[in-house]
Amino acid sequence: MAELETIERDAVAQTVEVVEKPEEGVYRKRPAFFFFKRVFDIFASLLASIILIVPLAVVAVMIMIKDPGNPFYIQTRVGKGGKPLRILKFRTMRKNADKLEDMLTPEQLEEYKKEYKLDDDPRLIGYKKEGDGKTCFGARLRQMSIDELPQIPYNILIKGDMSVVGPRPILREELEKYYTPTQQDDLLAVKPGLTGYWQAYARNDAKYQIGGGGERQQMELYYIENMSPTLDIKIIFKTISSVLLRKGAK
């Protein structure tokens, strides 16, 4: 197992080296590929929605029991072409979690502004004491990526503004802070995905770096440059194994 982990991390390192000049642009138009990609998205998301309808209902009820209120949460990210993308998620945080200054310490607020995530987030549903950010109810939903599942019927199947595989949708401030103008054009040339190369192979272990050279940026751009049915299938199966093993999950 340790040997496999080393091989995977070496592969990621090689990936970062591949995208040495992101300022040149990596996106290539491939209409046939995107047509069949959408066909796959429709059939895969329809099948998954049918299978998951009961589990999704159970999760929604559990959220309402633990923290009364709407179990769903809509967050605006940046979609293809720079258009606002409203993604549907299960609510993993307590109500009013968007009021960062009221719910976070100055140190936590600084950490959030850097990575847009917290190692120990006190806003999560079920959080009671320090350290609960990895074990509470809200944290479990995130670790298993259950909070992302409503995007399958809503964003992928019905609205069609997301794909099963693609760069993960991000906040506009993330995009403008960490990606160069050319990288932004590449990133926004394709639909965001429920999962992606970064999400599957590194998750939260890969970090941003101002200037566009961070491992996370490079991995997202690597996918855009090397998109193929084979790579999509690899990412899907790797995502499943990463979620089950909770690798890099926060």
Image: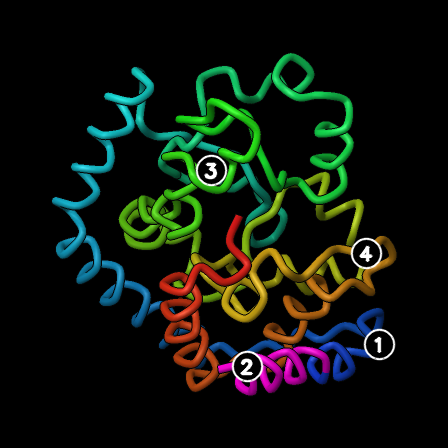
Magenta stretch in the rendered image = 1-13
Which callout, 2 or 1, points at the residue further toward the start of the chain? 2
Instruction: Give the label on residue 2, or none.
Output: 2
Task: Tell me the SS state at disc 2.
Answer: helix
> For the point 20% across and 59% down, which residue is it?
46
Labels 1 & 4 near each other (Cβ < 8 A): no
Q: Amino acid at mark 1?
A: Lys
Question: Is disc 4 placed on a helix, strand or loop?
Answer: loop
Q: CA distance from mark 1 to mark 4?
A: 15 Å
Q: Is residue 140 above or below residue 227?
A: above
Report which residue position mark 3 lands on: 86
Q: Specify which label sits upstream in the sequence, 1 or 3.
A: 1
Quadrant position of residue 204: bottom right
Neighbor class of circle 1 (other Cα within 10 Å; few <14, some 14-19, many 20+) is few
* 196 left or right, relative to 215: left
- Taken as a whole, is the magenta stretch helix, strand or loop? helix
Give the CA distance from mark 2 to mark 3: 39 Å
Q: In front: mark 2 or mark 1?
A: 2
Left or right: residue 211 compared with residue 145: right
Q: Earlier in the sequence, mark 1 or mark 4?
A: 1
Q: Which numbered marker is on residue 21?
A: 1
Disc 4 to disc 3, C-alpha distance: 26 Å
Asked if marks 2 and 4 touch (Cβ < 8 Å), the reply is no
Q: Which residue is mark 4?
A: 209
Q: Amino acid at mark 4?
A: Gln
